[in-house]
Image (cartoon, rainbow, N blue to C red):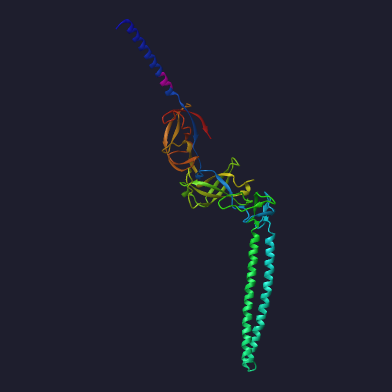
Amino acid sequence: MGRTDRRHTRRLLVLLLLLSAAAAGLWTTTRTQPVTVVLRALERGAVEAIVANTRAGTVKACSRARLAPSTGGWIVHLPARRGERVKAGEVLLELWNDDLRAALTLAESEAVAAAARADEACTTAEVAAREAERSAKLLRQGVASEELTDRAVGEAGARRAGCAAAQATAQVSAARIAVARANLKRTLLLAPFAGTVAEVNAELGEFVTPSPVGVPTLPAVDLVDLECLYVSAPIDEVDAPSLRLGMPVRVSLDAYPGRQFPGTVRRIAAYVLDREKQARTVEVEVDLADPGAIPGLLPGYSADVEVVLAVREAVVRVPTEAVIEGQRVLVYRPHPGRTRGTLEEVTFEPGLSSWEYTEAVSGLEEGTRVVVSIDREGVASGALAEPQRDLP
């Protein structure tokens, strides 16, 4: 080996030694550098098992009717006003109906005349019946002839038939009155229940026509009962079997941020909704405990529901964000007299669980400090750790 080769070899060895020393120093530094973690001390409290909706729910009215006349015509009376409260049976809209009112008056007059004719015919029949009875009595006494008696009996039968025919005609006339009233009623739009007029999509003097079959059109009047509201929300089919009527519910409304309102499950749909590109869900309806305590609550507001399945009081609870798969947590073990400590993996027996807390039936004690920042790099069992802060 020449002098030049030996010089290159010595330089390469020096470089390797320097790199080895740097690597050793870096390894020593990183090995002793603690990872910063966020801790939370375990406490006793309530743990709930809850089920929540998969998509936004909706506040709905118990009664809502999108009303339109069943026949076409000109609007001659429009007492409905947006935002007004109306009573059940109150007229909301009236179409031109002078011809139908005249027909009703005619039918009522004909009914009166038919009833009078029936009274006349039946009175005549009663007289004929008494005359026939007297003739029959005289015949038995030998005073009247058989021919006159037969004539009187036949006359009574004819008058009786005339009475029945007149009564039937009177009934037909009464039925015509019902038909005329029904035709007239078709020109009146009546409130089917007490409520508030939400929308009026008609104008006085405007000609309206019924909606064609299968073609949705705007209702002439949209009537809503604002006194009775509930929340409808979809629950995933996996969670539906655990639901029961009467279960307590917490309702959150986007229009009232930071507040929750109590309610109860009032209905669970008897079928599963299968909509394209959406999870299969079961519709659940919730009665609000005190809708009057929510000022300005309106149908159509979006809402979220949390159905409380079960509650455990005064149990050791673990923040669910601290739980690692396999029901494990990283417990912080402090070094005496130092601000650092070691992370230790501990397995516990879970009970009820929600997105917020998980019940620790055994394996963990109150006051134990666990890591909630488990996703940070370097956080693992046996790692040297330094607390960043303790969450309350």
User: Is residue 310 visible from the viewing direction of this image?
Assistant: no
35 or 192: which is nearer to us? 192
User: Is residue 156 visible from the viewing direction of this image?
Assistant: yes
The answer to whether 76 appears left or right of 285 in the picture is: right
User: Residue 319, percent across and down?
Assistant: 49, 38
Range of residues picked out in magenta: 24-29
Quadrant position of residue 193? bottom right
Residue lying furthest bottom: 142
Quadrant of the frame with the N terminus:
top left
Residue lying furthest top: 3
Tell me, yes or no, whether the highlighted magenta stretch contains residue 131: no
| Residue appearing at x 63%, y 62% in the figure | 182
The answer to whether 344 appears left or right of 268 in the picture is: left
149 or 385: which is nearer to us? 149
User: Residue 310, percent across and down?
Assistant: 49, 47
Quadrant position of residue 128? bottom right
| Residue appearing at x 67%, y 76% in the figure | 119
Asked if residue 73 is positioned above or below residue 334 in the image, the reply reads below
Asked if residue 386 is positioned above or below residue 62 in the image, the reply reads above
Asked if residue 210 is positioned above or below residue 376 in the image, the reply reads below
Asked if residue 330 is positioned above or below residue 49 in the image, the reply reads above
Tell me, yes or no, whether the highlighted magenta stretch contains residue 25: yes
User: Residue 13, percent across and down?
Assistant: 35, 12
Which is the main secondary structure of the residues drawn in magenta?
A: helix
84 or 379: which is nearer to us? 84
User: Residue 11, percent across and down?
Assistant: 36, 10
